[in-house]
Amino acid sequence: MEDKLKVTKMIHIALCSGLVMAYIFIGDVTSISFNMPALSQSNIIYVLIPIIAYIFSNFMFKTQLKAADKTLKPEANMAVYQTASIVRWAILEGAAFLILFLNKDFILFGILIILYLALIHPTEDRVKTDLT
């Protein structure tokens, strides 16, 4: 199980570190103040992006996991789990990049997405729990 999970962990680390580097270099996180700009009807979408990404990524993750055969061991369903995880992470990564490129004033929401992405890292216990 650990060998099959190693590839998924490396993909997760690569996605997280790529986002962090993009936020450091492109977003220039070190010089941006994290004050929330005033919300208006024109920029409410930047608040909704992380919420929609969270809901949609978890929905897609659970939908993909339904394809797993519950009678098999979790090791046999690792391909399904890896695919579901990559879909979930891609949605979150896309939302973080969307915020970064569209409006840097709301970069705090992108950082929250990155933190959430880092927290859902794959572990053996999490794989077993998600696949059962």
Image (cartoon, rainbow, N blue to C red):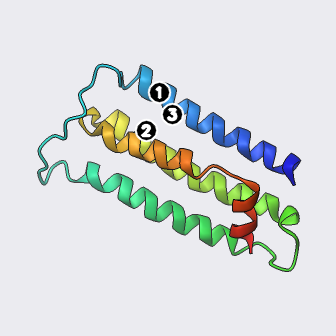
Quadrant for the N terminus in the image: bottom right
Mark 1 and mark 2: Cα distance apart in space = 8 Å
- Mark 2 belongs to which amino acid? Phe
Judged left or right of residue 125, residue 54 is left
| Residues under numbered marks 2 and 3 in contact, where contact means CB atoms less than 8 Å apart | yes
Identify the residue at horizontal 36%, vertical 26% (top origin). 27
- Mark 3 belongs to which amino acid? Leu
Q: Which mark is residue 114?
A: none
- Mark 1 belongs to which amino acid? Ala
Q: Who is closer to the viewer here, 55 or 119?
A: 119
Judged left or right of residue 18, residue 130 is right
Identify the residue at horizontal 71%, vertical 56% (top origin). 83
Mark 2 and mark 3: Cα distance apart in space = 8 Å
Question: Relative to residue 6, is residue 57 depicted above or below?
Answer: below
Q: Secondary structure at mark 3?
A: helix
Residue 32: where, in percent of width, then height?
A: 27, 25
| Residues under numbered marks 1 and 3 in contact, where contact means CB atoms less than 8 Å apart | yes
Crowdedness near tag 2: few (<14), some (14–19) or many (≥20) residues, C-alpha within 10 Å: some
Q: Secondary structure at mark 1?
A: helix
Can you identify the residue that label 2 sits on?
A: 97
Residue 116: where, in percent of width, then height?
A: 48, 49
Quadrant for the C terminus in the image: bottom right
Identify the residue at horizontal 50%, vertical 25% (top origin). 21
| Residues under numbered marks 1 and 2 in contact, where contact means CB atoms less than 8 Å apart | yes
Q: Who is closer to the viewer here, 63 or 34?
A: 34
Can you identify the residue that label 1 sits on?
A: 22
Residue 105: where, in percent of width, then height?
A: 24, 35
Crowdedness near tag 3: few (<14), some (14–19) or many (≥20) residues, C-alpha within 10 Å: many
Judged left or right of residue 73, residue 122 is left
Question: Relative to residue 40, is residue 84 depicted above or below?
Answer: below
Can you identify the residue that label 3 sits on?
A: 19
